[in-house]
Image (spheres, rainbow, N blue to C red):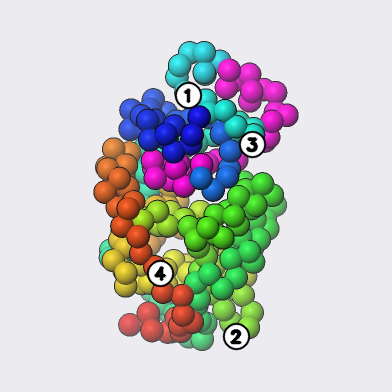
Amino acid sequence: MDPAAFFASLDVVGARRELVALGGTLEPDTLVAAYRAGCFPWPSSGPADAPLERQARRLARSGRVPVLPGTDGLVPWCSPHPRAVLLADQLHVPRTVRQVLRRSGWETTVDAAFDRVLAGCAERPETWITPRMQQAYAALHRRGVAHSLEVWEGAELVGGLYGVLTGSVFSGESMFHLRSGASKVAVVDLCDRLLEVGVVLVDTQQETEHMGAMGQVLAGRDEYVRAVHALRDRAVQVPADRRPVSRLAG
């Protein structure tokens, strides 16, 4: 089945759980279709994971979770309820982060080192960013849909984040830091650049203490999906020039 048709017909809002579909591929067309429907992939262990395959067959037989045929194993497609989001125009910048902005001397760019940011996000003892996920989002970046924001200390990359831009909705996927505060600085800088081109909605998927301190709020799945449908065809281009973070300290 064509992934665009599958996700367009999927009842995301009415799904009984945050797992709304299984299967398919992690190819760019499928990823784009999923994000346009308000979904994102959670990594599967691959086609050799027999217990997951048995679970998927049970779910498919019961009709509780539809299964999309594909070649990347049983990829779980998720749409949380409630959905954790940031509204870029209501971002809270903690005092400690303002101090870092003022004193660090760091600078930021967009899409200057996507593969390095992706690798930095994956480089931790336990990660959902499998090699196949890295390959998938690198391909999405080459398509011009996935983007990174880099934090630089001179020529050294000290932090960053990456995510997917679906029209005027930015879905944050992961972040990393090699210097204290660099990932939070990345969020502040991202929101500033997004607001410059009229993007307000930043999907942060799950509620976390880290993002809660910066103003993360919870939205109903129906609210989130309606917003995505309203904004997904409004294409924007995020400014990518090198900028000092000190401009954001005021």
Q: CA distance from mark 4 to mark 2?
A: 22 Å
Label 2 close to label 3 by CB (< 8 Å): no
Q: Quadrant of the C terminus?
A: bottom left
Q: CA distance from mark 1 to mark 2?
A: 49 Å
Label 3 close to label 1 by CB (< 8 Å): no
Amino acid type, residue under disc 1 in the picture: Pro
Q: Which mark is residue 66?
A: 1
The residue carrying mark 4 is 238
Q: Earlier in the sequence, mark 2 or mark 3?
A: 3
**Mark 1 or 2: the one toward you:** 1
Question: Residue 241's spot in the image, x, y percent?
Answer: 46, 80
The residue carrying mark 2 is 154
Q: Earlier in the sequence, mark 4 or mark 2?
A: 2
Amino acid type, residue under disc 4 in the picture: Val
Question: Residue 222's spot in the image, x, y percent?
Answer: 29, 38
Element marked by disc 3: loop
Span highlighted in magenta in the image: 30-57
Q: Earlier in the sequence, mark 1 or mark 4?
A: 1
| Residue 206 visible to the viewer | no
